[in-house]
Image (cartoon, rainbow, N blue to C red):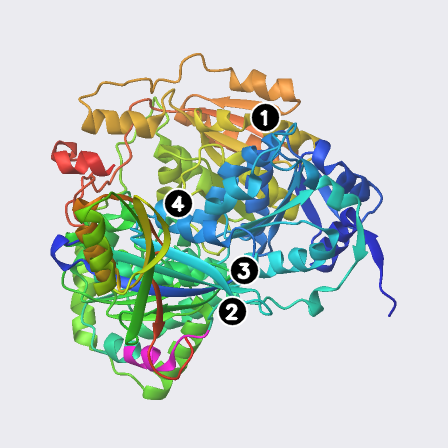
């Protein structure tokens, strides 16, 4: 049933009960059934209710994407599964910390470009910067691409978080 | 009412009693001693001591599948838990409700590689429906009651509760099951009415319909089987079933086509292939059923009713998917069918039956009879004829004998047929039979086995002896791992790599060593008398039925083939398996 040509990328939000091992269940589901994880983020979102929100970006055929959602929904501690790519218009953001080492022209150029991307300098030495940059994943990809010839040494990315536009909760 | 303070171990026992548990299957060890101590001081729950933890889980499966109640297992930490893993996976694949309690090292030792420590929740996460590590006695009551709720509601399955030893000593308040509501788990049991109406409309247009039913009907309970019978009668359509669904519809009925799939009947598989409307109730399009996916019932519209939304559109596209319990959906479907006063195309249906009768005439389960040697099919036929009028339960191991049992033993009622369908676990049958016998002390319980499979959990004969569970182990002894040998013959040029059952024990003497009765039959002439002798023996029997060593199990859909490309027993030259097919087996 898999057809290479109709692979889609979906961002799925999963609201789970924040019990021990819940993240392992989600990750185990993906690895055990051979689904892809492009990125995955998780944090508690409601302390009183003990709920966490997992945002997972995955790729697959429409049939596989449907399976992923159904499989997630049948996990016992899962409250809700929403496909932010299909069900709603959503905004997606990712943050990255990017370390660039070097001196001279390259250092100046890195700083100039960071300004164009509205990246912030959050650490500096005489021969390095750490930039904080936020945006859609392709913006971060572009920034990393520009930094590569300028002395890129280290990248740390959060993975995508996403939320639906409009007044409703998920 | 004043709050009751109980130890964790007492909470476990009280929760089991409140959940209606009368029997548990287990094996003691260091990390569950407090629970065993609490068990010793009560008389509401019977404990069946097995000889290996895998046996405990299979026995609990047998108990569960034959009663409709959840099975309960109690094992220790470390090896106790890891030995249970095969049984848990088996129960997950076949949707059997189980609650498995495992001991764990004390909480302060967890993660320290303590003696008999293992990461039980980590190991059992993929082979359970859900599992819990209980960190304090305060959580224990809630988790116990939740566990029964999760195991038995929605698609049933096994759950594990891992209880550290110090938690078993710790005191906490006990709460009754009525006060525990699960936070998140709300499975859908009622099907969407609009979808059911659409399904009825589609069924009404059918010219070549077929019911394809599975274990979901059995799991839904006897009422679902009744409703299925009613609906099949209302429509007059043919019906086939998966291995797991046998017994939901009576095999003696004219509308019954026999089992479908790899070793299903010619008429069932051809009817599946040629049908125009397929009504799947509680089956999951397993690869042993579908054969080649892109050639599966190519001209049909498919209705799929399943309690698990993830089963729908997983393998085969459903034109109408209905998420719900088989019984509930059937009830609605029959009501809507009647209220719409559906008129089916009777002449098309008559033509369809004519075609099916033509396939039936092929008599695909026939085999060459012999006067000198016991054919395995003949052995099952005789066993069926001599036991069918009793309250009989059949379990099996895995392999050729299992398929012959499915083909030649016929079931009229649900919950009478217990086999490892999804996982295909050799060693399932004997402990499962013990579980059935414990639940139904007066029934005739027979494990149809092979000489290879039976050795995988043979130690449980000792359990049968101890608990006076008079199970009959009917071994079709062909001195081969027969199904492995069959595939080596068909796929690997007859190179029988390690499939000969070398150095077999003398099963009659083995039975006697356990204190059971051993019987051997070598010729067709003596078979009936020996089977009667087995039935009349009050205790456990090991029946060594020496059968034709080289008989193969037909009919067969070779791997990578379609339903209408079956190999029949009298035409084995057609056994062509493609290179792609070899990869699929």
User: Mark 4 Cα within 10 Å, few/some/many (few <14, many 20+)?
Assistant: some
Q: Which mark is residue B459?
A: 1
Residue B577's place in the image compared with B334, above or below, is above
Circle 4 sits on which residue?
B422
Label 1 residue SS: helix
CA distance for labels 4 and 3: 32 Å
Quadrant of the snapshot with the N terminus of chain A:
bottom left
Q: Position of residue B459 (x, y in %)?
A: 59, 26
Between marks 2 and 3 in the image, the one whose residue lies nearer the viewer:
3
Q: Nearer the viewer, residue B502 or B194?
A: B194
CA distance for labels 1 and 2: 41 Å
Label 2 residue SS: loop
Chain for numbered disc 4: B
Between marks 4 and 3 in the image, the one whose residue lies nearer the viewer:
3
Circle 2 sits on which residue?
B186
Label 4 residue SS: loop
User: Mark 1 Cα within 10 Å, few/some/many (few <14, many 20+)?
Assistant: some
At 75% from the left and 48% from the top, the residue drawn is B45
Chain for numbered disc 1: B
At 32% from the left and 65% from the top, the residue drawn is A93
Circle 3 sits on which residue?
A18
Chain for numbered disc 3: A
Between marks 4 and 1 in the image, the one whose residue lies nearer the viewer:
4
Q: Position of residue B515 (x, y in %)?
A: 66, 22
Disc 4 with disc 3 on a shared chain: no
Stretch in magenta: B190-198
At 85% from the left and 44% from the top, the residue drawn is B41
Q: Nearer the viewer, residue A50 or B58?
A: A50
User: Mark 3 Cα within 10 Å, few/some/many (few <14, many 20+)?
Assistant: many
């Amino acid at each position: 049933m898999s057809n290479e040509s109709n692979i889609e990328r979906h961002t799925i939000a999963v609201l789970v009960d924040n019990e021990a091992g819940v993240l392992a269940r989600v990750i185990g589901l993906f690895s055990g059934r051979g689904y892809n994880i492009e990125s995955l983020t998780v944090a508690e979102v409601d302390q009183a209710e003990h709920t966490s929100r997992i945002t997972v970006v995955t790729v697959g055929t429409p049939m596989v994407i449907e399976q992923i959602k159904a499989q997630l929904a049948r996990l016992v501690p899962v409250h809700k599964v929403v496909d932010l790519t299909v069900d709603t218009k959503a905004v997606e953001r990712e943050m990255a910390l990017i370390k660039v080492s070097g001196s001279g022209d390259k250092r100046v150029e890195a700083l100039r470009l960071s300004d164009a991307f509205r990246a912030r300098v959050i650490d500096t030495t005489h021969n390095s910067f750490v930039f904080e940059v936020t945006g859609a994943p392709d913006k971060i990809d572009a920034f990393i691409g520009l930094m590569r010839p300028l002395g890129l040494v280290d990248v740390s990315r959060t993975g995508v978080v996403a939320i639906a536009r409009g007044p409703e909760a998920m | 009412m004043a709050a009751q303070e109980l130890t964790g171990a007492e909470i476990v026992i009280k929760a089991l009693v409140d959940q209606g548990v009368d029997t548990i299957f287990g094996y003691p060890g260091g990390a569950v001693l407090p629970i065993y101590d609490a068990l010793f001081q009560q008389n509401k729950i019977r404990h069946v001591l097995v000889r290996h933890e895998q046996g405990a889980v299979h026995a609990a499966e047998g108990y569960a599948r034959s009663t409709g109640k959840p099975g309960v297992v109690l094992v220790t930490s470390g090896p106790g838990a890891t030995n249970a893993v095969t049984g848990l996976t088996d129960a997950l694949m076949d949707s059997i409700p189980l609650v498995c309690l495992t001991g764990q090292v004390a909480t302060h030792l967890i993660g320290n590689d303590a003696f008999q420590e293992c990461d039980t929740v980590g190991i059992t996460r993929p082979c359970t429906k859900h599992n819990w590590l209980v960190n304090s006695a305060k959580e224990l009551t809630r988790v116990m009651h939740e566990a029964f709720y999760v195991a038995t509601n929605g698609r049933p399955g096994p759950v594990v509760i891992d209880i550290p030893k110090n938690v078993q000593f710790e005191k906490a308040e006990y709460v009754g099951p009525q006060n525990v509501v699960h936070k998140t788990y709300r499975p859908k049991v009622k099907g969407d009415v609009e979808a059911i109406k659409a399904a009825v409309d589609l069924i009404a247009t059918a010219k070549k319909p077929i019911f394809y039913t599975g274990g979901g009907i059995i799991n839904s309970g006897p009422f679902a089987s009744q409703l299925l019978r009613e609906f099949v009668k209302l429509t007059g359509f043919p019906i086939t079933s998966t291995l797991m669904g046998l017994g939901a519809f009576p095999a003696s009925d004219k509308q019954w086509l026999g089992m479908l799939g790899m070793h299903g009947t010619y008429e069932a598989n051809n009817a599946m292939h040629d049908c125009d409307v397929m009504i799947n109730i509680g089956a999951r399009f397993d690869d042993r059923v579908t054969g080649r996916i892109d050639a599966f019932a190519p001209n049909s519209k498919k209705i799929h009713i399943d309690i698990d939304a993830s089963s729908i559109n997983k393998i085969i596209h459903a034109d109408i998917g209905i998420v719900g319990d088989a019984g509930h959906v059937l009830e609605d479907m029959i009501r809507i069918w009647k209220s719409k006063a559906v008129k089916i195309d009777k002449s098309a249906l008559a033509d369809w039956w004519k075609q099916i009768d033509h396939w039936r005439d092929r008599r695909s389960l026939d085999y060459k009879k012999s006067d000198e040697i016991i054919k395995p099919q003949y052995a099952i036929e005789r066993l069926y004829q001599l036991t069918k009028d009793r309250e009989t339960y059949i379990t099996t191991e895995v392999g050729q004998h299992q398929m012959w049992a499915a083909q030649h033993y016929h079931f009229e009622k649900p919950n009478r047929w217990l086999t490892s369908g999804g996982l295909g676990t050799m060693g399932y049958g004997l402990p499962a039979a013990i579980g059935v016998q414990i639940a139904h002390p007066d029934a005739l319980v027979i494990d149809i086995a092979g000489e290879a499979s039976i050795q995988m959990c043979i130690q449980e004969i000792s359990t049968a002896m101890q608990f006076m569970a008079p199970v009959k182990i009917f071994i079709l002894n062909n001195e081969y791992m027969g199904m492995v040998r069959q595939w080596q013959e068909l796929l690997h040029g007859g190179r029988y790599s390690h499939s000969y059952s070398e150095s077999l024990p003398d099963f009659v003497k083995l039975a006697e060593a356990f204190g059971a009765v051993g019987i051997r039959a070598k010729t067709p002439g003596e078979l009936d008398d020996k089977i009667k002798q087995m039935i009349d023996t009050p205790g456990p029997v090991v029946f060594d039925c020496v059968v034709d060593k080289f008989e193969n199990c037909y009919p067969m859909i070779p791997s990578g083939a379609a339903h209408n490309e079956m190999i029949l027993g009298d035409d084995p030259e057609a056994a062509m398996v493609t290179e792609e097919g070899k990869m699929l087996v």
